[in-house]
Amino acid sequence: MISPAQDPYASRTDRSSAIIARQDPVVYENGQYAGALGAEQIGQYERDGFLLLENLFSEDEIRALSSEVERMTRDPSIIRREESITEPGSNAVRSIFMVHVLNPILARLVRDPRLVNVARQILGSEVYIHQSRANMKPGFKGKEFYWHSDFETWHVEDGMPAMRALSCSVLLTDNNECNGPLMLVPGSHRQFISCVGETPNEHYKQSLKKQEYGVPDPVSLQLLVEQGGIRSMTAKAGSVVFFDCNTMHGSNSNISPWPRANVFMVYNSMENTLNPPKYGLTPRPEHIATRKGFKAVTPLDTLKLVGG
């Protein structure tokens, strides 16, 4: 067993669940590394663990992105790839990973200064893509994503050392209260939930469809929610949600007729590259956790993703 003295974020050990105070900053270098956000926005992110920027992308840009994602979900050569994850119990595409490598338009998206400069500013360094994916939650049959902290999984299964990463979700469809929007627990990023259960090897093969290990216990989750509440990220297509790697989040299933889709990127600091996974676990594939082929993301000169 790895003791807390050796690892402040020990999880999935033989001990019981625990709530551990965050040891890392939320905003690095006082938010001075880049200038994408104002002081009030930086303060909101530091307080809540997330920030919603509405209407960041134009209708034309979202139309182009949506077209590319739709094409990928119908491309047999992509559906057959390991990067494509289907819904539990069906062949409907749930996620496509490594989209910034598989698609040139999405390769430009991850370099868009409206996104990458926010990541650089908050993380206080140059950044690289730890993971990218397109998420689909079709009407009537899109399944839920249970509550979890991404950092808990990335720390245990990928060997990410510190909480110096953030996620960025570009909304490709309107997100309303009925179609399973992202839900976040404000302030939860300041507490790490140490989870119970020994992680099976190659756990990702099951967890990407339905996660059973690395999920918070009900008592810890209830305490976080009693302190911070739950915030639904309802917004129009073209809006973007940035959230800390340790912010507790999840989403309900989509039983409405309205589909929900987004492109999701994880920016990790170049000073926070991966160590070996914990407990002798086999490293997850490169398309899930970039370990070998990482390089700093260079922001594009132009502010427009398409056209103009």
Image (cartoon, rainbow, N blue to C red):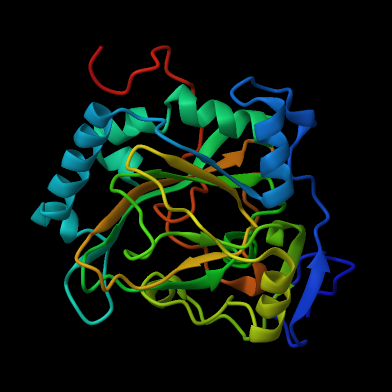
Q: Name the spot of residue 233 as percent of width and height, x first.
A: 47, 53
Q: What number of labels is visible?
A: 0
Q: Which residue is at a point 63% across and 66% down the rendered structure image?
A: 152
- Can residue 84 be seen here? no
- Can residue 54 be seen here? yes
Q: Name the spot of residue 144 as percent of width and height, x first.
A: 38, 73
Above or below, comparing residue 148 to residue 292 in the picture: below
Q: Quadrant of residue 252?
A: bottom left
Q: Which residue is at a point 52% across and 68% down the rendered structure image?
A: 282
Q: Quadrant of residue 84?
A: bottom left
Q: Which residue is at a point 17% across and 54% down the rendered structure image?
A: 73
In front: 79, or 170? 170
In front: 275, or 238? 238
Q: Name the spot of residue 302 as percent of width and height, x first.
A: 38, 13
Q: Name the spot of residue 159 as percent of width and height, x first.
A: 64, 59
Q: Quadrant of residue 186?
A: bottom right
Q: Tell me the quarter of the image containing the N terminus.
A: bottom right
121 horizontally vs 283: left or right: right
Q: Tell me the quarter of the image containing the C terminus.
A: top left
138 horizontally vs 118: left or right: left
Q: Which residue is at a point 39% across and 52% down the rendered structure image?
A: 287
